[in-house]
Amino acid sequence: MRGYRCPVAYWIMKAIISPFLYLLWPVKVEGRENVPTHGPAVLAANHQSFCDSFFLPLIVHRRVTYVAKAEYFDNWKIAWFFRAAGQIPMNRSGGDASQRALDTAKEVLDSGQVLAIYPEGTRAPDERLHKGKTGVARLALGCGVPVIPVGITGTRAVQPPGSMVMRPFRTVTIRFGPPLVYRLDGTEITTGRCGEPASGAGGRPDADQVELRTLTDTLMAEIARLSGQQYVDHYAKRTHAAAAPTQEGPAGGIPAPETGA
């Protein structure tokens, strides 16, 4: 759970992989100035392909940490890669294991770093953008950090679902939108360290859940605008992921403890 504190391995790996990615896949970037040059932030992106997690860190000049599904760390053949890349294992069965991953994600933000999350919670089964889970908004509110919406296009053509091979010479486009500063009831959330109760977010669990849903829907609408995807108001199913677990991308949709959404 502390792998993200090994920055040397991350930068060495990035230096080795980046030239090959740039050589084989033209990458167009728009709005990179929206990513803050310092301080904590959340990158919230759509998730169409396993290789999304290669291209997004490639074009961000800061270190990017993902929350990856725990199964990756059970296989020694690939676990070294995810540990070297500083990824955080997350058990998606819920309960204490997921809470520990969430706590570690908060540590990443509390240390002033960049955390990348896929609000859909799993790779989309089709080309549409699916309903986002409220864990992104909950994390941003609890840590008082901005969320930068990200639209990624072209990666599904690079590595279609079920494929182990990345097809060369397909163009990938990554668009960053303006940062979203989350508020509840029109009041800006101010916190000290991550995980402390957010002002304006206590004592009204039902109302707060509605607010979190509204904030998440606003985020997904912005991601849809950036990616050009059609939005569908239901969660992405994990049936494909269950059939081919080795192809599932990092699981960034951190579940809300009381709802799992």
Image (cartoon, rainbow, N blue to C red):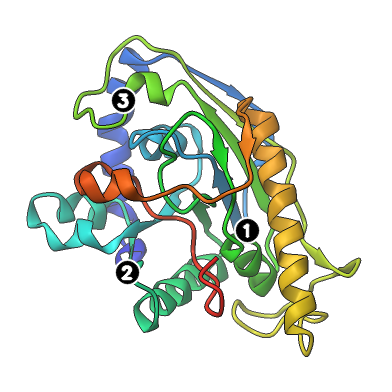
Q: Position of residue 5 (x, y in %)?
A: 35, 65
Q: Is residue 74 visible?
A: yes
Of 235 and 174, nearer the camera is 235
Q: Secondary structure at mark 2?
A: loop
**Residue 166 picture quarter:** top left
Across and down, in percent, residue 202 comes to 76, 86
Residue marked by disc 1: 39
Report the residue at 65% width, 46% height from top.
Answer: 148
* Mark number displayed over residue 159: 3
**Residue depicted at x 50% and y 67%:** 255
The N terminus sits in image quarter: bottom left
Q: Identify the residue shown where x is 32% and y is 48%.
A: 239
Mark nearer the N terminus (1 vs 2): 1
Image coordinates for residue 43, horizontal then vertical, percent? 57, 48
**Number of residues whose C-alpha sits closer than 10 Å to that of mark 1, classed few (under 14), some (14–19) or many (20 or more):** few
Circle 3: is it few (<14), some (14-19), or many (20+) Cα within 10 Å? many
Marks 3 and 1 sit apart, C-alpha to C-alpha, by: 33 Å
Is 89 left or right of 111, judged from the image as shown? left
In the figure, is residue 204 to the left or right of 246? right
Which amino acid type corresponds to the residue marked 2 in the rendered image? Asn
User: 260 or 56: which is nearer to us?
Assistant: 260
Q: Label 1 is placed on what type of residue?
A: Gly
Q: Which residue is mark 2?
A: 91
The Cα–Cα distance between marks 1 and 2, rounded to whole angstroms, is 27 Å
Give the residue displayed 69% in from the left and 80% down from the top. Answer: 192
Q: The disc labelled 3 sits on which kind of residue?
A: Gln
